[in-house]
Image (cartoon, rainbow, N blue to C red):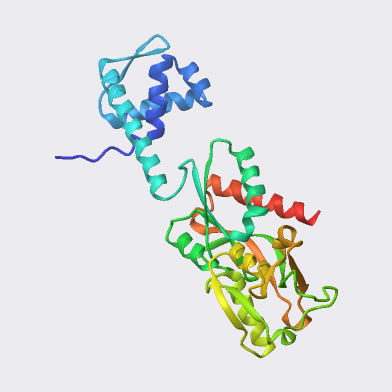
């Protein structure tokens, strides 16, 4: 039994056929589809050849559907409906076009960056639902690779993802500061040499967080291992411990606006100075996803606003 469908039967021709059956006229069909009358006539004629039986009869300059055409139309409607459903399910599996975007972010970016980008996204795509997940740099990157997130806002090294499977939209650079309890009597007009704080206690983020890597690197340069009282899993808890006088820490400057009255921030001396590059990252194979393109555009607009 031969079950191959003739190559002349395409979804495009079936769509033309369905529109013709609805309009009943080649000219009106051509107008509705933005095609020429010749293109409509050719599509119907070659479809008829592909089916292998007459579908229409000529009456003057008009085409009249035969009973076979009405039978084909009935099945066409089922096929197109099923194919549309199949495409929708396929996109869902691929993480595309769900009407929902799963965004991962560092905790520190929820103060200003993420709310502004989300507000912009809601203006661009009002019907799009946005799910937010917070975590460490490494956790979010792992979730992105596992397709548990669609895009993430994390700290990236310059050129870290160059030529890779990721697309990166840089947002801004952020300096790292020494954070001290407000009760400490320090000269905040001078830069902080970490060697002067070798006898102090410190609190730190856990491994996998962007600031943790910088923390390790800075004290490596200082030439000593700091006494770490505790490690925590979010930057807000860490700063609360600094506020309470538990210890010093290193934090990104973006936290300054919220905690400047309770925490002293000292610029690091030149050997220890470091900057984080905050970027939007998503998988390269999703580069044509309209929701991700909207997120990338919103990110670029946000970045331009910071420069101005």
Residue 195's quadrant in the figure? bottom right
Image-based side of 21 in relation to 118, left or right: left
> Foreground residue, 9 or 217?
217
Percent across and percent down for residue 24 are: 41, 14
- Viewed as shown, does residue 86 lie left or right of 118? left
Q: Quadrant of residue 282?
A: bottom right
Closer to us: 72 or 239: 239
In the depicted structure, whether residue 120 falls above or below residue 20: below
Could you tell me which residue is drawn at 14 percent across and 40 percent down?
A: 1
Query: From this viewpoint, which residue is outermost toward the right?
Result: 189
The residue closer to the viewer here, 271 or 18, is 271
Q: Residue 132 at x, y = what percent?
A: 53, 51
Q: Residue furthest top?
A: 60
Question: Does residue 117 appear in this view?
Answer: yes
Answer yes or no: is residue 276 visible. no
- Residue 297 percent coordinates (x, y): 65, 49
Q: Residue at x 45, y 25 (%)?
A: 40
- Residue 272 drawn at (x, y percent): 72, 81
In the image, farthest residue toward the left:
1
Residue at the spot 55% in from the left edge and 45% down from the top edge? 291
How many numbered discs?
0
Viewer-closest of 54 and 217? 217
**Going 53% across and 71% down the picture, which residue do you hit?**
208
């Amino acid at each position: 039994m031969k079950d191959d469908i003739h190559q002349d039967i395409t979804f495009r021709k079936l769509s033309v056929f369905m529109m013709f059956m609805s309009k009943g006229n080649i000219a009106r069909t051509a107008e509705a589809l933005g095609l020429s009358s010749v293109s409509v006539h050719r599509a119907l004629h070659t479809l008829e050849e592909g089916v292998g039986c007459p579908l229409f009869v000529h009456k003057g300059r008009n085409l009249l559907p035969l009973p076979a055409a009405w039978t084909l139309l009935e099945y066409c409607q089922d096929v197109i409906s099923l194919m549309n459903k199949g495409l929708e399910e396929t996109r869902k599996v691929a993480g595309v076009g769900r009407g929902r975007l799963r965004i991962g972010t560092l905790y520190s970016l929820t103060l200003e960056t993420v709310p502004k980008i989300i507000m912009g996204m809601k203006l661009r795509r009002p019907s799009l639902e946005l799910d937010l997940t917070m975590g460490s740099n490494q956790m979010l990157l792992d979730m992105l690779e596992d397709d548990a997130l669609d895009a993430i806002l994390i700290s990236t090294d310059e050129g870290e993802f160059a030529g890779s499977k990721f697309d990166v939209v840089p947002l801004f650079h952020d300096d790292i500061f020494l954070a001290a309890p407000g009760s400490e009597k320090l000269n905040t007009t001078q830069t902080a040499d970490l060697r002067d704080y070798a006898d102090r206690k410190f609190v730190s983020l856990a491994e996998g967080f962007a600031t943790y890597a910088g923390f390790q690197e800075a004290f490596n340069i200082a030439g000593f291992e700091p006494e770490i009282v505790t490690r925590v899993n979010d930057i807000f808890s860490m700063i609360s411990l600094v506020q309470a006088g538990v210890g010093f820490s290193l934090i990104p400057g973006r936290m300054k606006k919220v905690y400047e009255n309770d925490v002293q921030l000292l610029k690091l001396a030149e050997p220890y100075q470091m900057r984080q590059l905050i970027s939007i990252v998503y998988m390269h194979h999703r580069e044509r996803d309209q929701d991700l393109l909207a997120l990338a555009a919103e990110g670029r607009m946000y970045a331009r606003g910071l420069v101005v």
